[in-house]
């Protein structure tokens, strides 16, 4: 390790490898000791897993409140963007492999991909790095339909709904990840023609069996790509990953010293077990770089399991199992029907580079599917080869343009079909047979902890849907072509799935429909294996009934007061939609629930701000700083921190405060009016004379006489400064939290401290309405505040 870079006044140890300087890893990640042993307040949230949903949830907790967040991830830092936003440096997703036992484990693949669970089904596993699989995902983000949500709790149906009574939570997430506006980087004649063709196919008399006659294909492909700037002067977001938003938040938090920094990411931190007492997580067992550590957590600390459906379920089973955990496992059925249709079947199209995409919904009587349709004028059989690719070189671009096939349009119909879970806690667990489940294996990991065992198989109902979905894709393709003479199909006609690429080719006859998802079956030509979609879901499902679900509508375990889940493990049903959009939206809901729980209020009260400095503004000198735990602390100088968003007349104000030193001085200001047209500007003095100050100063120092007088009732803690004396000193010893209740009703002001009425001003003659503020007083004074809430009278 060497010190070669400077950041503010601190030297940063940056690792210099043979090939590179690891600036990003050092500037984003922290060691265990840096994060845990820095003297700051205890963590308010610990998020286990920095993948798609953990990184997102952690960032939202950090942004929405003055809370201290620790993110633990078993992997390393890799890159801070989706790999398709980068030049092609050789980062690829791991391929699916069967790992039925420890002896079959291939180890690390593609630098960061590993197989933590055991199963007779082939899975790609997990990407152990910041952002996880979100660095590689395809980006398709359709909504769950009302039919999909029919078996979800009613408040979540409303939460997702865009009807007048709904929260339209999808809309907010879609804007954030780039789905809205839809396909803002895809346009042109081919895009228009594909939509026109699909519209004609769907609305034609008789339509296509199993393709819904009422469809939303006209809305564009729901792809998480932000190509157009969201506002003037801002760059586009490009293909979404959760890594950038967590990175941005970490760098913001790093502007403070570690003891008051509010967000940390510790890599190589593998959480193996959570310990509980009285229905609360009290301790986390984690191996950091192979060294066993234990992190105590308080009952108010939220612990979020976000390390994938399978690994979060394993951790829950190992830590606080219930009979339902691991049931209701769902994945998706997936097929890839690739065709090329002669250009003559379309309207006039230019020969310039074109790409198009849309989504088509389909259903049977009991199940749903959708087709992710991509089209491009390219040679070969990959219609997405240029759709998600940064092209930095003009010669390369010219070459791509010149290599287009002038005769045909390549179209891929990727079918995604719904699987239905089984929630029965008494159903027999037989590997290789329904129902699907996750359990603990007899195989152990490097920390001697039991691995997850995953049973994922298809049923006859799955086969029926799969057949209907493939038939639908072929029928749509043929109708778009208009004639069998205009279409060819790309598939493997002669060998098994892992046959060489030369065995794949274009054929006039469509692929047979009697296909298997068994990777060793020679008839497997277009279907993907069950474990290859990364769409595992359902094993810790949400429900209103504690007797028939594992978690509540906020993602919290019913039986553990401070443990939550982020990710598709929460889904009661899966539908056919790729789970990322819904799971990200739920992760936001969970983050908000954690924030709200950290800001407890009595009935009728509401918080002022979000526990930190958001919504507040300084006038004068010094300031306040956020410490986490919704605590703010005065900083040297004298001034006033005031809540800018609202003025109040009659109210009850409650807040907690504590002093650090015997001569600490502060105060709570109420009803000071706006100065000028809008606010107190930068002058803290007028509120002293025009509003009311509820004093905090246990010495009772009167600064207006010489020599100073101490223990003056008009200047002592609890006094309405200079106007109503504190009849006794009711504050608690240094370091303990005190509670103020300040009731202002007309000209009458009552101050209650720790349950005792300590002062009462009658017939006050100052403003009857105004702002609320907190005072910082002198250099060295450190007074802390939290839980500021108000109830209008």
Image: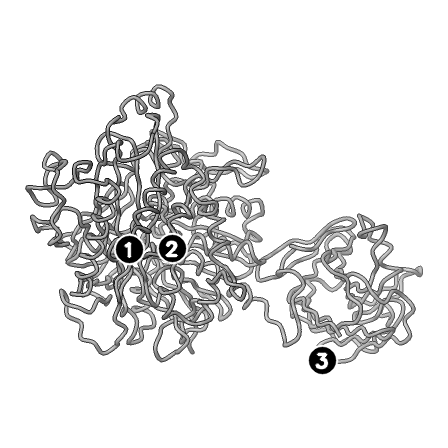
Point 36% across, 70% down: residue: 151
| Quadrant of the frame with the N terminus | top left
Q: Which circle, 3 or 2, is nearer the viewer?
A: 2
Compared with residue 602, is residue 98 higher up or lower down, i.e. above or below?
A: above
Please give the label number shown on residue 211.
1
Point 57% across, 39% down: residue: 231
Mark 2 vs mark 1: which is more N-terminal?
2
The quadrant in which residue 84 appears is top left
Cα–Cα gap, marks 3 and 2: 43 Å
Percent coordinates x, y for residue 303 in the rendering: 43, 64
Left or right, 5 with reference to 124: right
Mark 3 vs mark 1: which is more N-terminal?
1
Please give the label number shown on residue 49.
2
Callout 2: SS: loop
Around disc 2, counting alpha carbons within 10 Å, would you say few (fewer than 14), some (14 to 19), or many (20 or more)?
A: many
Around disc 3, counting alpha carbons within 10 Å, would you say few (fewer than 14), some (14 to 19), or many (20 or more)?
A: few
The quadrant in which residue 793 appears is bottom right
Residue 379 visible in the current orientation: yes
Percent coordinates x, y for residue 250 in the rendering: 50, 47
Left or right, 603 with reference to 377: right
Left or right, 142 with reference to 331: right
Cα–Cα gap, marks 2 and 1: 38 Å
Please give the label number shown on residue 755.
3
Q: Nearer the viewer, residue 177 or 720?
A: 177
The quadrant in which residue 456 appears is bottom left
Mark 3 vs mark 2: which is more N-terminal?
2
Furthest toward the top, the residue is 395
Callout 1: SS: loop
Percent coordinates x, y for residue 232 in the rendering: 58, 36
Residue 570 visible in the current orientation: no
């Amino acid at each position: 390790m060497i010190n070669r870079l400077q950041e503010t006044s601190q030297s940063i140890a940056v690792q210099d490898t043979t090939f590179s300087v690891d600036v990003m890893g050092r500037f984003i990640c922290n060691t265990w000791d840096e994060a845990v042993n820095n003297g700051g307040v205890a963590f308010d949230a610990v998020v286990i897993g920095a993948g798609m949903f953990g990184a997102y949830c952690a960032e939202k907790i950090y942004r929405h409140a003055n809370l201290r967040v620790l993110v633990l991830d078993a992997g390393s830092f890799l890159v801070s963007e989706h790999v398709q936003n980068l030049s092609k440096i050789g980062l690829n997703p791991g391929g699916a492999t069967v790992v039925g036992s420890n002896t079959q484990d291939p180890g690390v693949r593609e630098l960061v991909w590993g197989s933590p669970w055991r199963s007779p089904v082939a899975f790609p596993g997990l990407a152990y790095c910041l952002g996880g699989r979100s660095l590689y995902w395809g980006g398709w983000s359709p909504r769950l339909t009302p039919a999909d949500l029919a078996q979800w709790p009613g408040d979540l149906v409303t939460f997702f709904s865009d009807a007048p009574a709904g929260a339209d939570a999808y809309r907010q997430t879609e804007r954030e990840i780039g789905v809205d506006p839809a396909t803002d980087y895809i346009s042109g004649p081919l895009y228009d023609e594909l939509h026109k063709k699909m519209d004609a196919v769907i609305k034609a008399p008789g339509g296509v069996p199993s393709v819904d006659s009422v469809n939303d294909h006209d809305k564009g492909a729901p792809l998480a790509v932000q190509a157009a700037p969201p506002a003037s002067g801002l760059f586009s977001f490009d293909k979404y990953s959760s890594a950038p938003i967590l990175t941005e938040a970490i760098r913001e938090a790093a502007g403070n010293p570690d003891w008051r920094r509010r967000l940390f990411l510790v890599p190589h931190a593998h959480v193996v077990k959570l310990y509980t007492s009285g229905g609360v997580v009290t301790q986390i067992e984690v191996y950091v770089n192979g060294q066993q550590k234990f992190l105590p957590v308080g009952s108010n600390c939220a612990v979020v399991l976000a390390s994938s459906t399978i690994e979060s379920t394993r951790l829950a089973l190992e830590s606080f199992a219930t009979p339902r955990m691991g049931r209701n496992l769902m994945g998706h059925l997936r097929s890839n029907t690739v065709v090329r249709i002669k250009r003559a079947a379309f309207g006039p199209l230019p020969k310039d580079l074109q790409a198009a995409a849309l989504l088509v919904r389909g259903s049977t009587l009991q199940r749903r599917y959708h087709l992710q349709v991509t089209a491009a004028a390219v040679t070969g059989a990959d219609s997405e080869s240029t759709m998600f690719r940064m092209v930095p070189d003009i010669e390369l671009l010219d070459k791509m343009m010149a290599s287009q096939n002038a005769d045909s349009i390549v179209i891929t119909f990727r079918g995604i079909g719904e699987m239905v879970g089984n929630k029965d806690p008494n159903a027999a667990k037989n590997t290789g047979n329904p129902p699907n489940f996750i359990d603990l294996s007899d195989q152990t990991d490097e920390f001697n902890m039991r691995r997850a065992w995953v049973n994922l198989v298809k049923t006859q109902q799955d086969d029926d849907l799969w057949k209907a979905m493939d038939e639908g894709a072929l029928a749509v393709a043929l109708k778009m072509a208009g004639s069998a003479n205009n279409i060819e199909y790309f598939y493997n006609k002669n060998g098994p799935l892992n046959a060489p690429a030369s065995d794949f080719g274009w054929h006039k006859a469509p692929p047979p429909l009697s296909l298997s998802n068994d990777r060793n079956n020679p008839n497997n030509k277009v279907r993907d294996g069950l474990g290859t979609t990364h769409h595992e879901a359902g094993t810790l499902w949400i429900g209103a009934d504690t007797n028939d679900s594992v978690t509540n509508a906020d993602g919290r375990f019913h039986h553990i007061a401070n443990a939550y889940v982020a990710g598709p493990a929460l889904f009661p049903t899966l539908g056919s939609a790729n789970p990322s959009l819904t799971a990200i939206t739920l992760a936001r809901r969970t983050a908000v629930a954690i924030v709200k729980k950290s800001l407890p209020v009595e009935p009728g009260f509401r918080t002022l701000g979000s526990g930190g400095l958001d919504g507040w503004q300084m006038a004068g000198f010094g300031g306040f700083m956020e410490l986490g735990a919704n605590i703010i602390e005065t900083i040297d100088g004298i001034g006033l921190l005031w809540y800018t968003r609202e003025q109040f007349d009659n109210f009850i104000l409650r807040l907690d405060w504590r002093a650090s030193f015997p001569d600490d001085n502060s105060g709570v200001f109420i009803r000071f009016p706006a100065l000028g047209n809008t606010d107190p500007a930068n002058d803290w003095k007028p509120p002293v004379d025009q509003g009311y100050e509820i004093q905090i100063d246990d010495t009772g120092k009167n600064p207006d006489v010489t020599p100073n007088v101490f223990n003056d009732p008009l200047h002592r803690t609890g006094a309405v400064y200079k106007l109503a004396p504190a009849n006794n000193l009711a504050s608690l010893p240094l370091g303990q939290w005190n509670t103020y209740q300040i009731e202002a009703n007309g000209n009458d002001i009552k101050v209650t401290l720790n349950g005792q009425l300590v002062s009462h001003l009658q017939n006050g003659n100052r403003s009857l309405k105004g702002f609320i503020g907190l005072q910082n007083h002198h250099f060295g004074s450190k007074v802390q505040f939290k839980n500021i809430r108000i109830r209008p009278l």
